[in-house]
Amino acid sequence: MIGPQFASGHDTAMPKTLCMTHRTTLCTHRVSPAAPVPSRRRPGNAALSGLLLALLLSGCASQTPAPSIEAVETLPEPRATAPYDTTVIADLLLAELAAQRNQLDVSLAYYTQTARRTRSPEVTGQAARLAAYMEDPALALEMSERWLAMAPGDTTAMEIAALSHVSLGNADAAAGYIDRLLAADPDTALVRLVTQARNLDQAGNTELLAALAQLTDRYPEQAALWYARALHLKLEGQLEAALDANDQALRRQPKHEDALLLKGRLLSELGRGNEAQRHMRRLVRQYPEARRVRVLYVRLLLESGDDEEAFRQLETLARQHPDDQDLRLSLALYGLEHGARERSIAVLRQLVEEGYREDEIHGYLAQAAEADGETQIAIGHYLAIRDPDMALRARVQAARLYQDSGDTANSHALMADLRDHYPAQLPLLYAAEAEMLSDQNPEAALALLDEALGELPDSVELLYARALASERLDKLDRTEADLRRILVLRPDDPDALNALGYTLTDRTERHEEAFGYIERALAQRPDNPAIMDSMGWVLFNLGRPEEALIYLEQAYALYPDDEIAAHLGEVLWSLGYEAEARDIWADSLQREPDGRHVPRVMERLLEDDA
C-alpha cells in the first residue's frame, strides 16, 4: 500500500490490489498434524489418537488451525464418516509422529501413501496442503486433483491445483482452475489466490500473470485481472498493449495503487517522458504523503536528467521520512547511476557524517572517486573502511591505486602490512601484489613470487601466478615447470592442464602433447569457454581447422572476448570465410576497443593478404 493519504486524501486506505512481489509460504497456515504442535508435556497415545481422529473425521478444509493436543481431549466425540483399517490408522499415526518431530518429508510420505489407498477428502487434502507447503508442485497437483474428484467445489483444492500448475509452467491449465475460483467467488477469490501465491519465484510469477491475463474477457470488470494482464504484456515487451490494459484497470478502479504507478513507468519506457512526469506530478499533488509515488517520480526525474527537481523531491522525502536513511541511500545510488554525481555524492557524505552504514558508503564513495579519476580521494575512502570483511579487499584496492599512480613505496608498504595482519591470506596477497607489478615491472613481479614461493613452496595459487609471470617474460621453461609442479600436487587440476596445454600449443610446436592436456581439462569442464578456445586453437595448430571452428564458435558464443575472437577470426580466414572473420573482429573491437589480440592478428593476416 502507498499509504492512507493515497486513497482519498483523507484517512481511508486504498483497497488492496494484486501484488506479487513478496515471498512467503504457499500455505497460509500449517494445519496439525502437518506441523509440530507446541506442548509443555509429551503427549500420550490417547491425546495423539484424539488429534488424529479430529483430523480424519472432522476434516481440515477451513482456514482455522486445528486445536492443540491439550484442547482435543475436551472436544465432543466426532461423527465417523469413513472406515479406516488398522494399517491406515498406523500410517496416519506415524505421519503425526513425524510431524511432531518436524520431519515433514516423512509425514508427507505417509499422508500421500494413505491418500492413494483411501478415498478420504480429509487425508488427501492434508497431503495436498503439506505438499504445497513443502514446495513439491507435482505431488501437490496430484493430491489436489484427487481431492477435487471427491470434493469438486473445494476452493482450497482449486487454489493448490492452480498454483501447482503455475509452478510447473502450465499457465493454460492454471487459468482453468482460476476461472472456476472466480466463478464461485468473484469478490475474494483473487485476493485469496494471490495471498497463497506469495512464495512464487520470478518464473512462477510470470506464469501466474499469464494465467490471470487470459481471464479478462470472461471477467471484464475485474480491475486486478486487467492489471495482471498489463504486467504480463510488459514482461512480453508489448508496452503499448500493456498501457491499454492498465488503463482498463484504472477505468474500473481509478485508485488502484499499483496500476497508477505502472502507468508512470510504462509512459517512461515508451519514450513519453513528459507525459510520465505530468502523470507522476499529478499523483504527487493528489497524494503528497504517498512515499512510493514520490520515489517513482524522483527516479523518472533522474532518468530524464532533471537533477534539480529530483533532489528537491528527495529533500521532501527526507523531511517526510527523517528516520529513513535507507531511502536516501537508495535514491543517492540511483542518482549516481544516472549522472547526478555531485548531488548524490553530497547525500552519501551526509549519511557518513550521520554515522549511517559508514563502511558501505565509504566503498560507494571510493568507487565514485575512482571512476572520476580522483585517485587520492578514492584511496582515502578505501582506507577509511574498518569492517574486517570489507577492509581487506578495500586495502588491496587502495594498494593497487597507489601502484597505478606511481607510488610504489606506499603500495608495497600497504601490502606488506596486510600480509602481517592476514597470514591466512598470504598466497592471495602475494599474487595480488605481483599482478599489480606485472605491467610496470614484470621482473619485480617475478622476484616477489620467487620470494613468496620460498616461504610457501607448495602454494598452488603462487605457482600458477609465477607460471603466468614467467610466460609474460618468455621464460617458458619456468612456466612449464611450475604448471607441472601443480599437476604433481593436483594431478587432474583442469586449470593447470588447460594452461599447460595452451602454452605448449601457442608458444611451442608440441601440439600433440598439448592436445592431450587440453583434452583432459575439457573432459572435466566441457562447457568452459576458455578450455573450448584452447581445444579449438590446438586443433587448428594440428591442421584440423573444420573441427577447430566448432569449438571456437561455441566458446565465442559463451564468452566473446578479444583472444577467442582473434582465434575464431583466424580459423575462419584460413577456411576462406574472410567476410565472416572481419565481422567477428569488428564485433570484438566494438566490445573491447582496448583488446590487443584482434589488432595483432588483423595486422598479420591483412599484411600477408596484401
Image (cartoon, grey):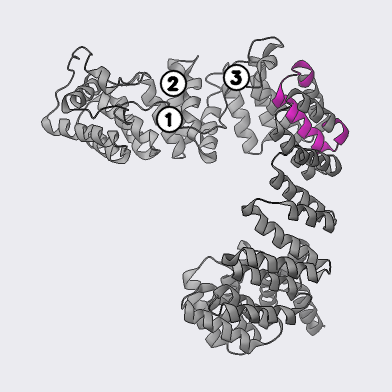
Q: Which quadrant of the figure contains the N terminus?
A: top right
Task: Residue at 76%, 74% (x, y): give it.
Answer: 439
Q: Residue 234 appears at what percent x and percent y?
A: 65, 35
Residue furthest toward the left? 86
Task: Residue at 71%, 51% (x, y): give it.
Answer: 385
Q: Earlier in the sequence, mark 2 or mark 3?
A: 2
Assign a secondary structure to mark 2: helix
Q: Report which quarter residue 103 is drawn in.
A: top left
The answer to whether residue 459 is seen in the rendering is yes
Disc number at residue 181? 2
Residue furthest toward the right? 308
Disc number at residue 162? 1
Q: Compared with residue 76, is residue 452 higher up or lower down, i.e. above or below?
A: below
Residues drawn in magenta: 284-310
CB contact under 8 Å: marks 3 and 1: no
372 magenta-colored: no
Q: Compared with residue 132, is residue 505 higher up or lower down, i.e. above or below?
A: below
CB contact under 8 Å: marks 1 and 2: yes
Q: Which amino acid is tagged 1?
A: Ala
Name the foreground residue: 247 vs 599: 599
Name the foreground residue: 598 vs 579: 598
Assign a secondary structure to mark 3: helix
Q: Earlier in the sequence, mark 1 or mark 2?
A: 1
Q: Residue 546 appears at what percent x and percent y?
A: 59, 77
Per the image, the residue denoted by label 3 is 223
